Image (cartoon, rainbow, N blue to C red):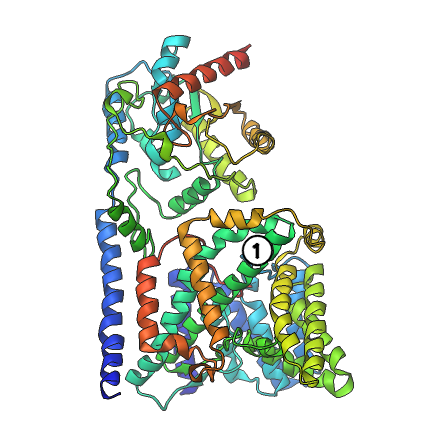
Amino acid sequence: MMLRTNFLVWILCALTIYGVSESFYVEKFIVPVLAASLLAFLLSKYRLRYVEYLLFFTISITSLFGLTENLTGSHAESSNALFFGLSFYSASMAYLVAQNRFDYGSVLSVSNPLLLSTGPIALFFKCITYKSFKRRIEYYFPFIIVGTFMFQIVGSPLTEFFFLIENTDIVSSLTFAAIFELFIYVNFCGLSLLIYGLFGVFGYRIPLNFNQPFSSRNIVEFWRGWHTSLSKVLKVLFYNPLRKRYSLFYALLGVFVASAMWHGVTFNFLLWGSFHALFFWLSVKILKHNKSLLPLLLLPFIIVVGRLIFADSDTDRLLEKLLFSFDGLNGISKIINMKNHSLIALFFGMSIIACEFIFKNAKVMQKRNYKFLRTPFALLVLCSFGVLFASNVGVDYAVYGQR
Amino acid sequence: MLYMGSVNRLIFWILIPLLLISYLAFRVAEWRLQQSDQSLIFAEGHAVNLSDSNDINCLILGGSNALFSLSAEQISTEIGLKCYNLSLLHEGYSDEAYFDFINSITFDRMKITSVFYSSIIPVIRSSFDKRMLNNENKRSISGKQDFQLLGGSIAGYLKYRLQDKTQHHYPSPTSSGDFNFDLYDGCDSKSIKDDWTLVNIDDDFRKWFGDNLLTLQSLFQNAQIYFVLPSTLQSNISDEELTTFSNLIQIEVMKQSVIYIEQSAFQSRDALCDGTHHANSHGRRIRTNELLMLLRVQNH
């Protein structure tokens, strides 16, 4: 029964992707199913040691050989349809194998075309049986509205700022990094909320990929709310086994470098992983001494500089940026002269982040599941602004999917 | 609190669906009504003008920059060619629409010996991006396209309406296809915004540009094609930047055995009508004179 409904959902998702895609490649849908089926078959016959690590790093190997793009946040769809969604389904299979939960029943959920296009990593895929359709609409439809607002109204117009990546002075590069962080957040989180809501309305629960990361007081809390499906995979595959043998620092270094290699095998990702491991470790050490102000002050620095490193796979340009040379306020003046729609999107995005941070201790924020945006009044405001400002300014693509 | 639940239900089940439905209704209405009469004026004018001319041997092609700023009449008078300005606003919105339009005009394409293709699309980044989008959406020469869930924002429409700008309608083209400045009084060079950026010459651009030049060559097999880098106002682009860019474009043009002509920038707004690359009648004379001078240099 479960297999039949999963198959129906798979077909529905494939049709949805087919409907919104400009091009159709049947291998995009079939290869993940075949790969997952083959793994299920092999696991049923043999005991494959450490196969979860091979699975996790498959995307690193394909990136190393240029078969898939690096995931800097710019459009990273692989030109080779055979590798469509590889990063997501290989990570999800690795997670399930590590927990001895991967079998033939998991094949259709890990290879679900919609999840492969947008995320999150399919750690679980459960039927919701305890809510009526009307209750599901009341609970899950607001996620669709919030997700669409973040992805389309805020995210797409922000792509107009991407030209700033070419500037290497400190003002321009930090401004770009901050805007790019905002873009990645509203794009990936928006899509994740949208997909979470869609699946929920149709009676399926998938991981909620973001938990208001900007309602954090330090980088440790931030990572608890950012791309949680990948964080769980990293925790099971790397943190837990490494922490049993090594110190916290080496365990964190292992986690972040593995995460970096999952995104792409380049210098900037290696640097990004080491940078985050170091500051994560430092924040933990400071917090252990009951000092919370310094980790809070470090938070914006770590996020923005981390994104600066993450975003630029051009090593020469990145190293030039990391010299932090001052060359006037050109970056700011270029932003001021941008189209109104992009500036409004920037304002909306900053407002969402400001609300997350300023009201982080409010009751409505406690569960960190975007309830502050899902109240009827907030939804009315989002819908009104959405209707007024929905436009075709900018480019819409899923920053994390497809690869 | 008793009423709060009812208000929330009213918002969730009535107001939000009403907002979403009204957005959809706006998009449907926009789609049904979308059609630029301004663009059609020129397309229809060209079709009428060319229906009874068999002696045309030279064409000016391109978008509004060529329509406003080049004169087929002046070229015909000064170098003895029989030239016609077949430019359209927005260069016909999409490549397919513009080339189909040229194909549909009843004149002997084999008699054409010179084609001056002056386009802003390979120069201005936003124009290139818009062109790619229009090509994707298969926009027609009237601007009509398939139904889209996204378009211009409602806020943008409201702002435009509230500004209460006087709309100036463009007149039909002259008998040589040129913009008829005698019948137009809407030039206002003070309100021109000069904030464009140069296009990024990458593989996508190279492919698009090369394909377009090849299409022109196949349409006019007996013609020498000239690609003319149009004159624009360019206060925020340095001469060095433009020279580097021009050299790169020239390489692309010459790959297709097309002759490259670079026109200089407009020196002041006095030569402009209503856009950075829309000359007024005075600016048109200056730009056409320069083109003819560069052509003579080229031929010697």
Q: Position of residue A64 (x, y in %)?
A: 69, 61
* B266 or B172: nearer the viewer: B266
Pick the front one: A281 or A89: A281
Where's residue A144, x and y in %? Answer: 37, 72
Judged from the image, the secondary structure of the residue bearing numbered disc 1 is helix
Q: Quadrant of the C terminus of chain A?
A: bottom right
Q: Is residue A263 above or below residue B225?
A: below
Say few, some or many: other residues with alpha carbon within 10 Å of mark 1 (under 14 / 14 to 19 / 20 or more). many
Which image quarter holds the N terminus of chain A? bottom left
Whether residue B280 can be seen here = yes
Residue kind at label 1, given as amino acid type: Phe
Residue A120, placed above or below residue A158? below
| Left or right side of B77 for A360 | right
Q: Residue extending furthest bottom?
A: A130
Judged from this view, the residue extending furthest toward the right is: A246
Residue A67 shown left or right of residue B227 in the figure:
right
Q: Nearer the viewer, residue B129 or A389?
A: A389
Give the side of residue B92 with respect to residue B214, left or right: left
Q: Quadrant of residue A46?
A: bottom right
Say which residue appears at 49% left-offset and 82% top-offset. A361
Residue drawn at (21%, 47%) of the image: B33
Residue A346 x %, y %: 46, 59
**Observer-nearest of B131 and A175:** A175
Q: Which residue is mark 1?
A: A176
For mark 1, name the chain. Answer: A
Picture layout, residue A325 above or below residue B218: below
Residue occupying image coordinates x 61% and y 88%: A100
Q: Is residue A213 above or below residue A336?
A: below
Tag count in the figure?
A: 1
Going by the image, does A285 lie left or right of A101?
right
Instruction: Give the x, y percent position of residue A32.
Output: 53, 70
Task: Let me know if residue A29 appears in the view.
Answer: no
